[in-house]
Amino acid sequence: MKILVTGGSGYIGSHTVHELLNAGHEVVVMDNLANSSEESLRRVAELTGKQAEFHQVDLLDPEGMKKLFRDTRPEAVIHFAGLKAVGESAEKPLWYYQTNVAGTLNLLYAMEEVDCKTIVFSSSATVYGEPEEMPLTEKINMDAQSCYGRTKEHIEDMLRDLGASDASWNIALLRYFNPVGAHESGRIGEDPAGIPNNLVPFIAQVAVGRREHLNVFGNDYPTVDGTGVRDYIHVVDLANGHLKALEYLASHGGLHTWNLGTGNGYSVLEVLHAFEKACGKELPYKIVDRRPGDVAVSYADPSSALADLGWSAERDIDTMVRDHWNWQKNNPNGYEA
């Protein structure tokens, strides 16, 4: 199958491109390189012996996207491209709505023009907000607490309305939790631009000496140690979930929603201590104020993905942080080196 991957040179995108190529698919990558590097795709080619076709195109360039789709004629799309920082979204809401929501609308118009009607969308557990019940199932109503989460919620609504209006669309909404880790080779991994917004890449940069200490946002949550609890999933497990979703859409069609997570929650300090074990040293941290939009506890019920897709996460937290450290210690400055 010929698959176009938006944001394909980014963290989750590059690992998914790796798995797609290994599975024998033809891959076209579209990325604006705002928060990623084409070096990731060169390394994917090195690991797989196969080359993804790359095009530097922005979601906010509708004509550029339409031309790309006319030229490449993909059969399906995996849509990662977008902005993703909870804190930043509170400061720049219009930028987030324009990029994530309007950008996805541009993408859907480009797909429709060439009759490409299969899409796997990179949604997020942030759409759930802070419900009283745990674990989170796909049946819980969406109630995002952050601007970032609400952009994902709007896109899901848009895709549901599209699927309801035209049964020829095949749509997977993948609500995934907190991706961490890296390919076991240490050749591809997470390389955020500027200061990392997510926990594990920040810890990794502290461990390698790029940051002085970790800021822990709040220690007064109703959790085991007062710090926020999240469901962390290995990026390779997550990538494989996208392949399983594509296979399911090819044989079943329709619109489907699945959580991709492990079903286990770990606090910030538990993840920090696991990383200390992996890198063999104590890492400094400071407790600071909570961030707006953060919830106390979030972890998945991934049973629907297991039942429908035959998918479940295989790698535990120790493997996640070990692989992440292996990437960071071998690439202390990310792809820049």
Image (tube, rainbow, N blue to C red):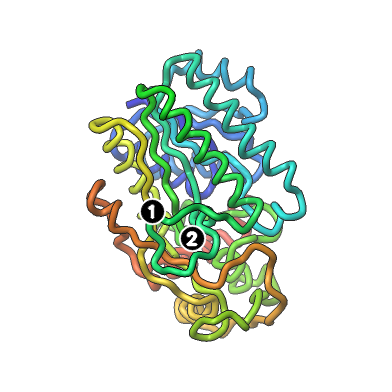
Q: Which residue is mark 2?
A: 178
Query: Does dot 2 land on a helix, a strand or a loop?
Result: strand
**Amino acid type of disc 2?**
Asn
Q: Quadrant of residue 2?
A: top left
Q: Is residue 8 visible?
A: no
Labels 2 and 1: the sequence-earlier one: 1
178, 160: nearer the viewer: 160
Residue in view at x 50 percent, y 73 percent? 229
Q: CA distance from mark 2 to mark 1?
A: 20 Å
Query: Is residue 255 shown left or right of residue 114?
Result: left
Which circle, 2 or 1, is nearer the viewer? 1
Q: Position of residue 136 (x, y in %)?
A: 41, 62
Q: Nearer the viewer, residue 73 or 21?
A: 73
User: Left or right: 287 with respect to 317?
Assistant: right
| x, y percent for residue 241 | 34, 48
Residue displayed at 27% across by 37% down: 248
In this view, 306 is above or below 300: above
Q: Residues within 10 Å of mark 1 (few under 14, many from 20)?
A: few
Q: Which residue is mark 1?
A: 139
User: Is residue 264 in view?
Assistant: yes
**Residue depicted at x 39% and y 39%:** 172
130 lies above or below 305: below
Q: Residues within 10 Å of mark 2 (few under 14, many from 20)?
A: many
Above or below, comparing residue 236 to residue 46 in the picture: below
What residue is shown at x 42% (from left), y 42% (from top)?
A: 173
Q: Type of residue at label 1?
A: Lys
Query: Are the residues at dot 2 and dot 1 in contact (C-beta closer than 8 Å)?
Result: no
Figure quadrant of residue 186: bottom left
- Residue 240 coordinates in the image, percent (x, y): 34, 48
Determine the secondary structure under disc 1: loop
If the image is split into quadrants, where does the N terminus sit? top left
